[in-house]
Image: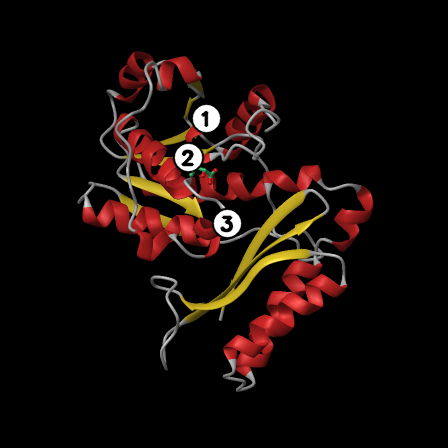
């Protein structure tokens, strides 16, 4: 596996290939990321992972400075997962001058759910993803479904800009108790970790109620948020939406239930397709 840190070295390493399959990450990798790499492998003639902690998508109160940077361990895991090429630029390399050209995603897709609680997040994500897709010459790119809204926004961006890339969603990997794997799980202390699967359980009970015919979505969402609060969580949202664009569902729409909640100082997100 080759590891490159500069744009010219990346362009050089990509020369023999026609169809890079790319997995963009911010590093601190876990089994969820590695599953995306394995999913990407048959999609292209070279499997590329990017590792870049993107300042543009962090708010002033977010964990940009403390976000774990674990390049050596990440590369060892990527190599074992069959990755061919890692692009891990420094900030100076990737943003050598202030990134004043930015993507402004449409408010209809981003003023709700994650976008409501993390202003500027999707502008930062779209800007870096567009730049990463361009410089890796991605023809396929795999993003985890755990960040469901992120995947939807990136998919729509790629479609509207007619980017020559197929955006592919990868299923969420879970710990045996149901907790969705996430780099931020590492922030949980032992007591919080023991409790953390309650978020997934909460989504399951909403999904179960809907499958049983309960169509009072507003009430189900409110009840789920109450039950999280009673267990000591601070929920931002529990929301039943249609899968395609995360708008309020109409009859017969395929549904997804999404949640974000804070446990202590750690904010977790999760979702379940119904
Ligand atoms: O999901 C992530 O890890 C990041 O948001 C991404 C897509 C790599 C962009 O920085």
Q: Is residue 56 above or below residue 89?
A: below
Q: Which mark is residue 268?
A: none
Quarter holding ligand 1: top left
Is the distance from the Cβ of mark 1 to the nearest ligand 1 atom less than 8 Å?
yes
Residue 198, horizontal then vertical, whole percent: 70, 60
* Residue at far right of view: 191
Q: Nearer the viewer, residue 211 or 217?
A: 217
What secondary structure is found at the residue carrying circle 2? strand
Q: Is residue 223 above or below residue 38?
A: below
Q: How many angstroms separate mark 1 from mark 2 (CA)?
A: 8 Å
Is the distance from the Cβ of mark 2 to the nearest ligand 1 atom less than 8 Å?
yes
Residue 177, horizontal then vertical, whole percent: 71, 57
Q: Closer to the observer: label 1 or label 2?
A: 1
Looking at the image, residue 80 sits to the left or right of residue 132; the answer is right
Q: Closer to the observer: label 3 or label 1?
A: 3
- Image quadrant where residue 247 sits: bottom left
Q: Label 2: which residue?
A: 24
Q: Closer to the observer: label 2 or label 3?
A: 3
Residue 58, horizontal then vertical, whole percent: 49, 34
Mark before the other along the chain sequence, 1 or 2: 2
Q: Nearer the viewer, residue 168 or 90?
A: 90
Q: Label 1: which residue?
A: 52
Residue 105, horizontal then vertical, whole percent: 30, 46
Q: Label 3: which residue?
A: 117
How many discs appear?
3
* Residue at far left of view: 162
Residue at image point 60% right, 72% down: 222
């Amino acid at each position: 596996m080759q590891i490159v840190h500069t744009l010219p070295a990346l362009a050089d390493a990509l020369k023999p290939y026609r169809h890079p399959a790319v997995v963009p990450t911010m590093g601190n990798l876990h089994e969820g990321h590695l599953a995306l790499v394995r999913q990407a492998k048959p999609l292209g003639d070279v499997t590329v992972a990017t590792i870049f902690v993107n300042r543009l998508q962090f708010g002033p109160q977010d964990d940009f400075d403390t976000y774990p940077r674990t390049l050596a361990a990440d590369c060892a895991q990527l190599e074992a997962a069959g990755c061919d090429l890692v692009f891990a630029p420094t900030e100076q390399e990737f943003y050598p001058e202030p990134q004043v050209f930015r993507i402004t995603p449409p408010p209809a897709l981003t003023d709700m759910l994650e976008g409501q609680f993390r202003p500027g997040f999707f502008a930062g994500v779209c800007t870096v993803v567009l730049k990463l897709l361009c410089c890796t010459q991605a023809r396929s790119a795999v993003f985890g479904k755990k960040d469901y809204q992120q995947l939807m926004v990136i998919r729509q961006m790629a479609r509207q800009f007619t980017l020559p890339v197929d955006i592919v969603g990868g299923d969420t990997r879970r710990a045996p108790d149901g907790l969705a794997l996430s780099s931020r799980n590492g922030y949980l202390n032992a007591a919080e970790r023991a409790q953390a699967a309650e978020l997934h359980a909460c989504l399951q009970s909403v999904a179960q109620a809907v499958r049983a015919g309960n169509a009072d979505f507003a009430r189900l969402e409110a009840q789920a948020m109450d039950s999280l609060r009673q267990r000591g969580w601070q929920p931002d949202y529990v929301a039943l939406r249609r899968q395609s664009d995360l708008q309020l569902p109409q009859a017969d729409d395929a549904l997804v239930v999404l949640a974000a909640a804070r446990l202590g100082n750690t904010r977790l997100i999760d979702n379940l397709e119904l």
